[in-house]
Image: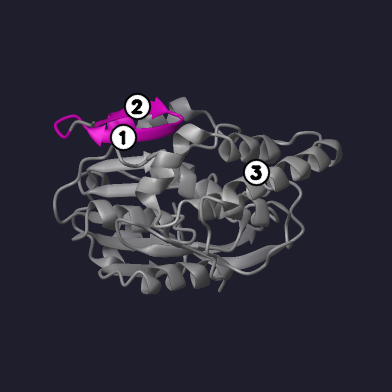
Amino acid sequence: MLNLSVNLASIQTIVNAEKVYFRHLNVQCNMSWKINWIKNEAFAVKDYKKHKSQLENPLKFYLALLLKAIPNFWKKPIHFQLRNGGSFNVVDFMTLYIYKEIFVDGCYDRVELPQYPTIVDVGANTGLFSLRMKQLYPHSTIYCFEPLPSNIEELRRNINGSHLSNVTIIPQGMGGTTRKEKLFIHDHNIGGHSIIASKVPDSKRYEHISILSIKEAFRDLGIVKCNLLKLDCEGAEYEIIKNIDHELSAQIDEIIFEPERSLYGIDELIQHLSTLGFTVEDRGICYAYKQHLGTT
């Protein structure tokens, strides 16, 4: 594990190096979304305070942008210690993107849960969503569904390293039916793997994984009340939601899902959830909640 000591005097060095690196990549990569995102983050001074509120050493984020930008350039993990409890390793560049989305942008912070909530995390990846939920709801019980072995290994490391209790890792995917599937591997995005081949058109690899239906998952885990169902599973959310019936929906208070709009019509899922008594707000990420619960 990399032990980075970064101080304010390092910033200019990092920025200067990034400028040179960006000039090179602008020619080689024709300004891909990744390069644009790195540029925006590297020079977004307004976000520094947000990083500082989340990380013990916020400058590590900027150094990690540089070190992890080129695939396989810096293979060692970079350890991030969170101010509000927990820690995680940055092994892959996309972990930085996920961290920013969850901790800095607070994309899941709007939910209002009871003091002792039960949370089902489908597409747990390396555990950053669960880390954030444990910060906000330290007495929560969380079930993490993640089928990819490399992600499971890092998920266990982050959960155990953060000394989190009442977090159960289920090394399976979730779907509408129980079955075996191929998980197509995205070579450049640890959160981009999918059971839908067209979602990862350039994939040359796949893993055989087990899928557990949402109904069997709730039954086998003894979940009577799920206060929050989070779905970030690259297209599988469609079949999961479509297989929630009135009986199962009575056990679920809130659903947050990131729709794959290129794969299906989002209006179909919104209509289905509406017939189950959910109000759905589409803000890029979709929030479905029972009207009497409300949102923030």
Closer to the camera in the image, 159 or 70? 70
Judging by the rendered image, the residue that carries numbered circle 3 is: 15
Closer to the camera in the image, 91 or 110? 91
Image quadrant of residue 20? top right
Q: Residue 241: x percent and y percent? A: 39, 42
Q: Does label 2 or label 1 sit earlier along the sequence?
A: 2
Check the image and report above or below for 97 versus 281. Answer: below
**Is there any visible trace of residue 191 in the rendered image?**
no
Q: Secondary structure at mark 2?
A: strand
- Mark 1 to mark 3: distance in Å? 41 Å
Q: Which residues are magenta?
A: 273-293
Q: Is residue 213 left or right of residue 223?
A: right
Judging by the rendered image, the residue that carries numbered circle 2 is: 281
Q: Does label 2 or label 3 sit earlier along the sequence?
A: 3
Closer to the camera in the image, 241 or 42? 42
Q: Residue 109: x percent and y percent? A: 31, 41
- Mark 2 to mark 1: distance in Å? 6 Å
Mark 3, Cα crowd under 10 Å, few <14 / some 14-19 / many 20+, is: some
**Is there any visible trace of residue 118 in the rendered image?**
yes
Of the 4 image quadrants, the one containing the N terminus is bottom right
Residue at left offset 58%, top offset 67%: 77
Q: Nearer the viewer, mark 1 or mark 3?
A: 3
Q: Secondary structure at mark 3?
A: helix
Judging by the rendered image, the residue that carries numbered circle 1 is: 288
Mark 2, Cα crowd under 10 Å, few <14 / some 14-19 / many 20+, is: some
Q: Is residue 177 left or right of residue 110?
A: right
What's the amino acid at mark 2? Glu
| Residue 287 sits inside the magenta stretch | yes
